[in-house]
Amino acid sequence: MAEKFPLRAIILGALLSVLVALYSAYAGLKVGGVYWPMVTTAVACMALAKLLGGRSIHETNVMQTTASTGGLLAAGIIFTIPAAFMLGFEISASDIVLVGISGGLLALIFIYPLRQQMIVKEKLPYPDGTAAASILKAGDSAGVKRKRLFAAFGAGAAFAVARDVFSLFPSYINLESLKASASKLFSLGSSISLIPLAGGYLIGARFTFIWFLGAVASYFLAIPYFVSAGFFADKAGVISAITRPVGAGMVMGAAIAYFALVGLPAFKSLFSYYKSTPLGRKSTFILVLFAVILAYAFDLSFPLALLAIAGAFLMSYVGARITGEMNIDPMELFALILLLAAKYLFGFGAIHLVLLAAVVCVAAGIAGDAMQDFKTGHLLGTNPMHQLAGEAAGVLSASLVMGATMLSFASVGFGTMDFPAPQATAIKEIVHSEGMPLALEIGILLGVALTFAAAKLNLPSAPIAFGIGLYVPIELSLPLFAGGILRFLADKAGQTEKWRLVAGGVIAGEGLVGALLVLLAAAKFLGA
C-alpha cells in the first residue's frame, strides 16, 4: 500500500521551521554558530506527533524533515547578509526572502540526485541523521529505549535550566594552562555545555581527533611561538592575524581540492541520473529560469547570476559530502570561496559579492541539512519524495520570515555587542579589503596541497577537519574530542547505539530549553 502524502506533517513542520529559523538567527548572530537543530526537532516533532495522534513514524519523519530546514537556512542568511548592512548598503526584506528561496531551492534541485549515491550506495554516516532515526524509532516503541531517550532528554533539559534559569553555575569557566610559564598565554574559556560532548560522540573518534590536532597546533604550537618570538603581544593578535585566516584558508583550499578529487569523478553518474528522472530532464530549464530571476531581482549581470548557480552547485556538493563524513558544514567558508573568486577574477561590486555569498551559503547549508534528513528517511523507509516536498515547504516558510527578522535585527546593529555576527564581519572585511590577506593565501595553498597528499592515504577530507581545528575556538574542540573518545570506547564495547540514543537525547534536551530561552530573548528585537 502506497504511503499517503503527509500534508498535515508538512504544514506543521513548515510552522516549526519558522520557529527554528527565528531562534537560529538570533543565536547565530550572538555566538556565531547554529548547532544540531536536527536532533532537537526530532524530539519536538515526535512529541507533537504523539500529542496529535500521529499516524506513523514516517509522518513524524516528514514533519521533522520540514522543521529542521529553518535552522540552516537562517544560518546561511545571518552568516552573510549582515555584511551588506555593515558596508552601508540597503537591502530590502524581499531581497532577503529571495536569497533564502533561491539558495534553498537550488540546493534541493542539485542535492536530490546525490541521495542515491551518497546515502544508498556509499552509506556515508551522516551522524545527525542517524541519531534522529534512533530517536524516532525509540519514541515509536515502548520499553527500555523510550525510557533511555526521555531520561537523557530530561538530563539535558535539567542541565540547561540549572545553568541558564537558576544560574546554579556560570555559563563559562576559565581553565588555566597546566604550565605556569604559559598561564599568560592561555586562559581557555570553556563553555559549560553537554552539547559539544554529545556532538563529538555522534561525529566519532577519527574526525574529532584530526580536528583536535588542528586546535593543538594552533593553541600549543603556533600561538606560543609567535608570542615568544615577539611578533605579537598576546594570543589574540596571533589568532586574528594568523591562525584563524590560515585555518579558514585551509578549509577553503581543501574544499576546492576535495571537489576536484571526489566531486568531478562523480559527475558522469550524476548527469546520467538527471537524464533518467523527470526532475533531472527539467533541471536545465529550471536553472536557466533561476538565472534570469536572480539577474532581474538583484540587478546582476547574467554571467554573475550563472556564477551564483554554479557556485551553489559546487558548494552544495561539498557541503553535503563533508556533512556526511564529519557532521559539520563550514558553509560560510564555502561561500567565501566563490566570493573571493568573483572579487579577484571578475571584479564584481561589493553588494553583488555579498548577495553571491548569501545564495551560495544558503545552498551549502540546506544541502547538508537535506542529506542528513534523507539519511534519517532512508533508515526509516520514508518516501524520499515526501521528504523533498517537506524540505521545499520548510525553505519557503523560513525564508518568508527572515526578511522582516533581519531588518528588525539590523535596527539594533550588526557587528555590535548585541549582534557580533562574526562570519558576516569576516565577509565584510574581505569585501572591503584591497587584497587577499597573506595568511589566507597560505592557508588555501596548504589546504590544496594537504588534500592531494591525504588522498593517497584515503583521507581526502582530513585537511578540512584539521583546518576547522585551527579556525574554531579550542573550547569547542576539546569537548568534541572528548566525545569522540567516548564514541571509540562505546564502539569497542559494542554499545554504540545505546549511547547514540543518550547523546541525541541530551542534545535535544539542552537544545530545546536553549531554543525556548533564545526565542524569549529574541522577542524584544522582533517587536513582541
Image (cartoon, rainbow, N blue to C red):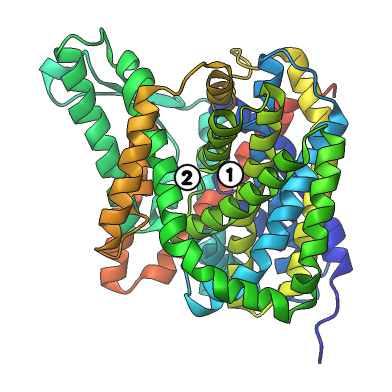
Q: Are marks 1 and 2 in contact (CB under 8 Å)?
A: yes
Determine whether, in the image, residue 324 is placed left or right of residue 66: left
Disc 2 target residue: 195
Q: Residues within 10 Å of mark 2 (few under 14, many from 20)?
A: many
Q: Residues within 10 Å of mark 1 (few under 14, many from 20)?
A: many
Disc 1 target residue: 511
Q: Quadrant of residue 73?
A: top right
Q: Amino acid at mark 2?
A: Ile
Is any part of residue 24 visible from this angle?
Answer: no
- Cα distance, mark 1 to mark 2? 8 Å
Q: Amino acid at mark 1?
A: Gly
Residue furthest to the bottom in view is 1
**At 76% across and 27% down in the image, what residue appears?**
406
Element under label 2?
helix
Element under label 1?
helix
Judge by depth and name the residue closer to the eye, 414 or 282: 282
Quadrant the C terminus occupies = top right
